[in-house]
Each structure stands twice: as structure tokens, then as C-alpha cells.
Image (cartoon, coloured by chain):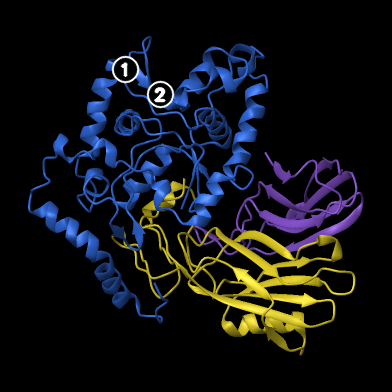
């Protein structure tokens, strides 16, 4: 969520969460319209570690072979281009079985889990993800030989200067 | 108005590694937002995406709320034979969508 | 912008206003000096210095706009194409029944809207024109402004003008352009700022980490990452006005039409990019 806080008179905000307490009057906009209101406690690095442990068990996490391509500075955390490329021959005997992406500060640590096989030809995926705050994103590749490889990138999130009320 | 957009080379050479781009319309409501009255807005996301090639699964993904709205997923496969690529998205509240693309492999 | 530790609310308020204070304080000082209290033609951006905000975007966001198969707005364009061909209303007519293939009949149309409606003696924007057709020709209900259906149709139509230069050379639009200019240069809201203060005088400078754009409507309707959906120029203007802590005009209001007309004149000659992607 970065450090921007918006201040309409009467509203307060705190910490790193995007908290916007609406005017009583603005309830007139419509009782059930979604808003950028209080978010629950975010995931922590510890939550991310346990989500990773759920995938790799007590296997060792090696550095290398995996490249997480994600911009170091993004214009809007709602939509962040994210690609993972893994060095692998993708042959019947040596291929990438799965790719997992994790984050450390969203409300939930998992981002995407992908299953691949030799038919993929190339161990590469691209998608667009949401990042709630400046944080570290981690990609883990699971190989056919049971080994795990990872790459982590720090991403800084900026926001637009002006928020709008819900429509 | 759910609609999917698939981009794949329609006439690849046999054995060529081809890129498949998929884009589907879906709000991916995270389940972490609240209304102005404080009520939680329930989660409503696509949870699974599966691609098959002449019936055989070539790619699958489990999606979480951290996937941006209108999920965009790009992946690769080897152009083995002519036939049909089928894509299926399923999610919360019984959501299901599918799209098919034919490819002719030289 | 690294993440700070949690701070108590009052302190956060003071910190945040100090952080915002930089550019805003600068603008406030300039404004207070009264030098910008009346803005003249001299404040217009020179024609050859005009830039689309596309140029300030990151490579990833540009790539999203440049590739139709990656641009989420394409989903709206496809929906718009389906609506174009679907019969509607008591007359049971589709847009295509009268207008044929949009790629031919609608080419260049979005680039010259808002256009002057001689019968109504007022400018009408693209959304307004679509609804006039729906009501009068299809005998169907008007589509709600900012509804998915209307955005789909405008995205489909605007797509047919991609690459074409914006045209604004109808002398009948002059009063509306002037009215829009007055609104653009009018101080408003709790910040007491005019649109022109940021978008004519401080474009390119940073406001809270993001570059201030010149504010040309070359890509509407567009997919905004902040909205995670497609929205119109009027929605973006509403967003700005609320951000400036001013009361926004209503969708479809004469003020918004005047502003659209002025902004299209201000961007005359610049190529259309619709449907664009913006942060």
C-alpha cells in the first residue's frame, strides 16, 4: 500500500494499511458498495515461509535456475506483470513439474501454482498479480528429480495520487 | 458477459514450442474487501485453469485472490499434432467457462 | 517508497500531509501568489510539446496496451462488437442493420466526438450519441452511463479510430470549448486548485511518486489498473475531482460534456489510442 494516505476532512489513516473510514454521510452513496476499507492483517514473512513449507516439506531450497521477472517498481499494485522462467531441458527425464509463486504481505501468501510437464517445451509462465504493499515476491520451481529452486525479488509499489469514491 | 481471448499461432511447425496467451473476463473479488457498512464482500474468484491438447492435459494452474482481475495467463506447449486446444476455467459459486481453439500443425 | 513502521493515527496524519505537502505546497504557494489566479492562452501547452501519458508508463504497462491479446480492454471491445450486431428494442434493430460494418462506418467517428448535434443545438458525446440512437432508432432503453454495455459499445467504436488524429475543427463547438476551458482553469475543491495548475503548468513533475500527465483523452474508454476495469473519460475526470476534494459533476452533465469538448480540442491532432491501458 506504500506510504500514501489520503485525507479527506474527518478521515484518518494509519500504518501501512489502506484504511479509509468513510463519512457517515457517504453511506448515502449506497450501503453495500465496496470500498477501500479496512483490510485484515496482512500475511507476514512467517506466513509465507509456512506456505512455502507446505509445498516443499523439509527439502532444501536452492538458489538459481529460476528467474522471477517482475518490475522492481510498479505503478499500481492492482495489476503487476509477473513472469517465471526456469532453465530446464524439459525432457521426459528432466523437467519442471511445478512453479509456485508466493508473496509476503498480501492477506494470503499464495499467488499461483502451476503444473507443467515435458509437453510444455519451455518452463515459462506469465501472468498479472496483485501486490498490496511493497514486499518480496518468491518463485519456486519443483523439478522432476524432487529438487526445489527459488528466486526472490523485492518490489516497490506506488499508487495513483488520487482515489475516487465508489461508483 | 464472460468472454475469453486466446492467442496462439494457428499454423505452427511440428515440434515447435508455441506460446499460448489466455485472457478471461472475471472480477476476481478477493474476499478481503469490505462494503461501506463494514460487511465483508465474499470471495468470488477463478480457482482453477486447465488446458488440454486433443484431450490430454498440458497445463494446469491453481489461482488465488492475488491474481489480478481479468486473469491473464501465458504458457507454452509443443505443437505435436493438429487438433483442438481446450481451455477451462472454474471457480467460486459454480463458475465455469471454456474456450476452444483449433490448430493445424504442419 | 519503502514501507514504514506502524504509526499512531495522529502522527500518521501529520506525516502524510507533510509528504503530500511537497508538491501541493509548491502548487499552493504558486496559487497563493496569485500569479495563476487568471490563466490565459499563454498557459496552454505548446502543440509540439504535447505528449500522451502513454510515454510515461512503465514498459510492462505499455506492453499491455500494445498487445491486443494482453489488453484486458479487448474483452470489452469484443462484447461491444456482439452488442453492435445484436438486435435491440421494440424496433428489433441492431446497430449493424443501419451502420453496417463498424470498421468502415465508424472509422474516425470517436476521433471527432463530442460532436455538435444540430437538432439539439448542443454538443453530444459518444455515449450520448449511442443512447440517442438506442432510444430513437432502436426504440430501446438508454444504456446507463458507465454501465458495462455502454462501455463495451464505446470501446468498440473508439477502437475503430485507433491511430487516427483527434479532430476538433467545428466552429459550432466554440462556445462549448470555451466553457470547458473555463472549467479547466477554475479553482475548485478544498485544495483550491484548477485542473490547469497540474496539467498545464506542472505536467511531468512528480505527485506522490507518479508523473503528472498532461491529461489528453487519447485513449478513452480505457482499462485503468486502479479500476481493474474499463471506464470513460468522465469517470476519470470524476476521479480527479474527488482527488482534488471537489464535488464531482454528474455523469452526462453539461459540465462534463464541455470539459470533454475542450479536452479533445486541446488534444487536436494527437493520435487516438483507444482502448488504452493506464495505471
- In the figure, what tint was chain A given? yellow
Residue closer to the observer: A12 or B21: B21
Chain given the colour purple: B
Location of residue C187 (image quadrant): top left
Spot occupied by residue A83 in the image (x, y as percentages of width and height): 63, 64
Tag on residue B39?
A: none
Specify the quadrant that holds the N terminus of chain C.
bottom left
Location of residue C148 (image quadrant): top right
Which secondary structure lies at badge 2?
Answer: helix
| Residue position for label 2 | C112
| Residue position for label 1 | C170
Q: Earlier in the sequence, mark 1 or mark 2?
A: 2
Spot occupied by residue A113 in the image (x, y as percentages of width and height): 73, 68
**Measuring 41% from the left and 49% from the top, which residue is drawn there?**
C55
Location of residue A53 (image quadrant): bottom right
Which secondary structure lies at badge 1?
Answer: loop
Chain given the colour blue: C
Q: Is residue C199 above or below residue A151?
A: above
Amino acid at each position: 500500500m506504500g506510504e500514501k494516505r489520503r485525507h479527506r476532512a474527518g478521515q484518518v489513516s494509519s500504518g501501512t494499511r489502506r484504511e479509509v473510514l468513510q463519512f457517515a454521510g457517504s453511506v448515502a452513496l449506497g450501503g453495500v458498495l465496496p470500498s477501500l476499507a479496512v483490510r485484515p492483517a496482512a500475511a507476514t514473512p512467517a506466513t509465507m515461509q509456512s506456505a512455502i513449507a507446505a509445498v516443499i516439506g523439509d527439502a532444501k531450497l536452492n538458489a538459481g535456475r529460476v528467474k522471477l521477472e517482475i518490475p522492481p517498481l510498479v505503478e499500481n499494485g492492482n495489476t503487476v506483470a509477473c513472469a517465471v522462467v526456469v532453465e530446464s531441458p524439459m525432457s521426459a527425464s528432466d523437467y519442471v513439474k511445478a512453479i509456485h509463486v508466493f508473496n509476503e504481505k498480501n492477506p494470503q501468501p499464495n499467488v499461483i501454482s502451476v503444473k507443467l510437464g515435458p509437453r510444455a517445451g519451455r518452463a515459462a509462465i506469465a501472468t498479472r498479480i496483485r501486490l498490496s504493499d511493497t514486499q518480496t515476491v518468491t518463485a519456486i520451481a519443483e523439478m522432476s528429480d524432487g529438487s526445489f529452486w527459488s528466486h526472490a525479488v523485492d518490489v516497490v509499489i506506488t499508487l495513483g495520487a488520487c482515489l475516487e469514491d465508489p461508483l | 458477459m464472460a468472454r475469453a481471448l486466446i492467442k496462439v499461432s494457428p499454423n505452427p511447425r511440428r515440434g515447435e514450442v508455441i506460446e499460448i496467451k489466455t485472457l478471461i473476463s472475471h472480477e476476481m473479488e478477493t474476499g478481503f474487501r469490505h462494503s461501506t457498512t463494514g460487511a465483508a464482500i465474499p470471495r468470488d474468484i477463478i480457482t482453477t485453469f486447465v488446458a488440454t491438447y486433443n484431450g490430454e492435459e498440458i497445463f494446469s494452474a491453481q489461482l488465488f485472490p492475488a491474481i489480478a482481475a481479468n486473469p491473464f495467463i501465458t504458457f507454452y506447449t509443443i505443437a505435436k499434432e493438429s487438433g483442438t486446444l481446450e481451455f477451462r476455467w472454474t471457480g467460486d459459486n459454480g463458475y465455469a467457462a471454456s474456450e476452444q481453439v483449433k490448430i493445424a500443425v504442419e | 517508497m519503502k514501507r514504514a513502521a506502524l504509526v499512531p493515527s495522529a502522527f500518521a496524519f501529520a506525516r502524510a500531509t507533510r509528504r503530500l505537502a511537497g508538491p501541493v505546497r509548491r502548487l499552493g504557494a504558486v496559487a497563493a501568489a496569485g500569479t495563476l489566479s487568471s490563466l490565459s492562452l499563454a498557459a496552454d501547452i505548446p502543440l509540439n510539446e504535447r505528449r500522451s501519458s502513454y510515454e510515461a508508463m512503465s514498459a510492462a504497462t505499455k506492453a499491455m496496451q500494445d498487445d491486443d491479446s494482453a489488453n484486458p480492454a479487448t474483452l470489452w471491445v469484443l462484447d461491444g462488437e456482439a452488442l453492435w450486431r445484436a438486435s435491440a428494442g421494440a424496433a428489433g434493430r441492431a446497430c449493424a442493420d443501419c451502420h453496417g460494418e463498424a470498421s468502415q462506418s465508424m472509422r474516425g467517428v470517436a476521433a471527432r466526438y463530442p460532436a455538435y448535434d444540430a437538432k439539439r443545438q448542443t454538443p453530444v458525446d459518444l455515449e450520448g450519441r449511442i443512447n440517442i440512437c438506442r432510444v430513437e432508432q432502436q426504440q430501446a432503453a438508454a444504456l446507463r452511463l458507465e454501465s458495462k454495455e455502454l462501455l463495451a459499445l464505446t470501446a468498440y467504436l473508439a477502437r475503430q479510430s485507433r491511430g487516427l488524429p483527434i479532430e476538433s475543427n467545428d466552429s459550432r463547438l466554440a462556445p462549448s470549448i470555451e466553457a470547458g476551458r473555463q472549467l479547466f482553469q477554475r479553482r475548485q475543491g478544498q485544495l483550491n486548485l484548477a485542473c490547469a495548475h497540474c496539467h498545464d503548468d506542472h505536467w511531468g513533475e512528480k505527485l506522490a511518486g507518479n508523473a503528472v500527465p498532461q491529461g489528453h483523452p487519447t485513449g478513452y474508454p480505457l482499462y485503468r489498473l486502479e479500476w481493474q476495469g474499463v471506464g470513460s473519460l468522465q469517470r476519470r475526470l470524476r476521479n480527479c475531482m474527488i482527488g482534488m476534494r471537489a464535488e464531482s459533476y454528474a455523469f452526462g452533465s453539461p459540465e462534463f460534456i464541455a470539459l470533454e469538448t475542450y479536452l479533445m480540442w486541446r488534444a487536436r491532432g494527437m493520435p487516438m489510442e483507444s482502448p488504452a491501458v493506464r495505471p
